[in-house]
Amino acid sequence: MTTPPGTTRKGGARRDAIVAAAAQLVGRAGPDAVTHRAVATAAGVPLAATTYYFRDLDDLLVSAVTQVGERETATAARLVAALPAGRRSTRDTATVVLDVLLGADRRTDEQLQAYYERWLAGGRHPALRPVLVATRARVDELLTEVLVRGGHREVPVARLVALADGTALSALVEGQGGARAATEDAVAELLSRRRRW
């Protein structure tokens, strides 16, 4: 992150540490885990620092969610860039789709719940909506590239994302575990019906 104008280098480093701590909380437990006290503790700064560098909690959340989104889309872009061209099996493509959409390292139901809580937080924190919309647009671009490079260009990305999100959320609500596996199965099944589009 760059140092905001009028901020010293030390102040900029402290602000960056606060954002990094908040981003870690968002990634691990969702936006509701972000409180001034929790962030100050995680960043190792005085509580007053979180209110000094940020107007309010929404301001801090926007910075944290922006950082998480940028980090995740950069990781997904590297994954997509490394994909060999050519048709892959529907199962292999489904795995890559979920790695791009949900994150390659997000496997447990707890991790998926924190991920979806970030997206749902846009309803409670309208300031997050532009960040979430921009992140989703970038993810959709990457998913389009995955589908095209894997020989599934006819599959509508919006339908694919809706299916994946709906399946994962339903599995999380049902609480039987294995939300990622259920979602991968649903995406693979959708991709296998490509000729019907």
Image: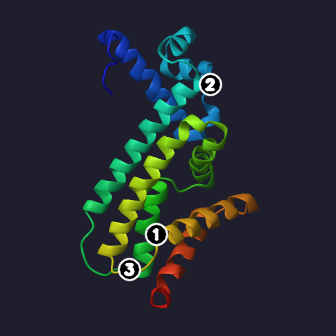
* Residue 162 x/y as whole percent: 57, 66
Q: Secondary structure at mark 2?
A: loop
Q: Earlier in the sequence, mark 1 or mark 2?
A: 2
> Mark 3 and mark 1 in contact (Cβ < 8 Å)?
no
**Residue under label 2:** 35
Residue appearing at x 47%, y 15% in the figure? 53
Write down the quadrant of residue 5 in the picture. Answer: top left
Give the SS element for disc 1.
Answer: helix
Q: Are marks 2 and 3 in contact (CB under 8 Å)?
A: no
Which is nearer the N-term, disc 1 or disc 3? Answer: 3
Q: Nearer the viewer, mark 1 or mark 3?
A: 1
Mark 2, mark 3: which one is toward the viewer? 3
Q: CA distance from mark 1 to mark 2?
A: 35 Å
Please, what is the three-letter code of the amino acid marked with disc 3?
A: His
Q: Which residue is mark 1?
A: 157
**Residue at the image position 40 percent from the left and 74 percent from the top:** 93
Up-down relation of residue 62 to residue 121 (above or below): above
The numbered mark, 2 or 3, whose residue comes first in the sequence reads 2
Q: Mark 3 = which residue?
A: 152
Count every numbered label the image shows and give the total: 3
Q: Nearer the viewer, residue 104 or 152?
A: 152
User: What element does badge 3 sit on?
Assistant: loop
Near mark 2 (Cα within 10 A), the count class, few <14, some 14-19 or many ≥20, is some
Q: Are marks 1 and 2 in contact (CB under 8 Å)?
A: no
Which image quarter: residue 155?
bottom left
The disc at residue 29 is none
What separation in Å lies between label 2 and label 3 (alpha carbons)?
Answer: 43 Å
The alpha-carbon separation of the residues under discs 1 and 3 comes to 10 Å
Q: Is residue 177 above or below residue 42?
A: below
108 up-or-down from 145: above or below: above
Q: Relative to residue 134, is residue 175 drawn left or right? A: right
